[in-house]
Image (cartoon, grey):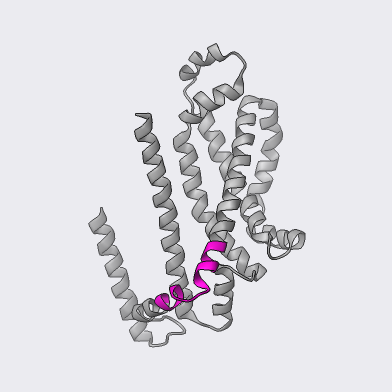
């Protein structure tokens, strides 16, 4: 599998090099070598680390808050069917609202420096809620018969029984939303023109028609997304080992 991925990457880079040489215009499609050089220039600049850390912090903060909120809502909705019915229209509404609408409203409500966190929260909250609630629904009822000894202490059941049973669903929803939240934060930063962040860097590059810089930052964004996945996979496997 790894050999196939490596071969695919090599083929893609070769095609990229051939097409860019045929076009011969960096403003349309820069060469891989030019992008690598620009990539090195970016990571060695003093402003690189603050921009990266600010964007990552905003993404992690928004995803974590929405994850905790969704977990509490999903656990309550699973326990109380009336609450689940009440939340259903709200879930459909939040899921259906276009991201650009969320961005505009967040900018009006909070201003450009704080809007990015709220934007990601509102976008990923329905995803967290749906995935976590689905995890609760997939629990085998036969496994829950032994929980009768806990009587009505639902919080105790939640901590000792329900959450361990849906741990894989929790990791999966985090893996799917962390990279998404990271990308949405960058888009929100571009719209809001925040002072420090990857979105600000991309906005500046777009204004200067610096396609090479855009490609370089895009590679960095992809690498960060892969890193997030690797970290979550590590903790997921570690949890499986500890449980076994």
Q: Residue furthest left?
A: 3
> Which quadrant is the C terminus positioned in?
top left
Nearer to me, 196 or 142: 196
| Left or right, 48 with reference to 190 | left
Residue at image point 39% right, 46% down: 233
The image shows residue 237, relative to residue 122, as above or below, that is above
Q: Nearer the viewer, residue 11 or 191?
A: 191
Q: Is residue 89 visible?
A: yes
Residue 40 in percent (x, y) is at: 40, 76
Which span of residues is magenta-colored? 39-54
- Residue visible at 62% across and 16% down in the picture: 152
Q: Residue furthest front?
A: 46
Residue at (55% x, 53% y) in the render: 60
| Rendered view: 235 above or below 27 | above
Question: Which residue occupies 58% across, 78% down?
Answer: 204
- Residue 96 x %, y %: 65, 50
Q: Position of residue 180 (x, y in %)?
A: 52, 55
Task: Indicate yes or no whether the magenta region holds residue 41.
Answer: yes
* Res. 98 visible in picture: no
Residue 240, given in percent of the width and then of the height, sits at: 37, 34
Q: Is residue 115 above or below residue 207?
A: above
Q: Residue farthest to the right?
A: 109
Q: Quadrant of residue 2 in the image?
A: bottom left
Quarter of the figure with residue 103: bottom right
**Figure disc tally:** 0
Magenta stretch mostly in which secondary structure? helix
Asked whether 110 falls inside the magenta stretch, the response is no
């Amino acid at each position: 599998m790894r050999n196939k991925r490596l071969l695919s990457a090599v083929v893609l880079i070769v095609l990229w090099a051939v097409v860019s040489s045929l076009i011969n215009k960096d403003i349309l499609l820069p060469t891989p070598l030019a992008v690598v050089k620009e990539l090195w220039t970016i990571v060695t600049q003093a402003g690189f680390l603050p921009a990266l850390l600010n964007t990552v912090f905003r993404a992690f903060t928004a995803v974590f808050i929405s994850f905790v909120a969704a977990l509490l809502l999903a656990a309550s909705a699973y326990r109380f069917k009336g609450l689940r019915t009440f939340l259903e229209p709200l879930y459909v509404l939040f899921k259906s609202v276009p991201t650009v609408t969320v961005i505009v409203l967040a900018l009006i409500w909070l201003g450009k420096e704080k809007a990015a966190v709220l934007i990601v929260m509102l976008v990923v909250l329905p995803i967290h809620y749906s995935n976590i609630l689905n995890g609760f629904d997939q629990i085998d009822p036969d496994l829950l018969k032994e929980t009768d000894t806990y009587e009505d202490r639902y919080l105790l059941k939640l901590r000792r029984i329900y959450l361990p049973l849906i741990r894989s669903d929790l990791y999966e929803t985090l893996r799917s939303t962390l990279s998404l939240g990271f990308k949405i934060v960058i888009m929100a930063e571009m719209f809001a023109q925040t002072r420090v962040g990857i979105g600000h860097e991309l906005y500046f590059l777009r204004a200067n028609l610096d396609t090479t810089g855009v490609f370089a930052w895009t590679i960095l964004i992809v690498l960060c997304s892969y890193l997030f996945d690797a970290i979550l996979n590590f903790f997921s496997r570690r949890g499986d080992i500890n449980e076994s």
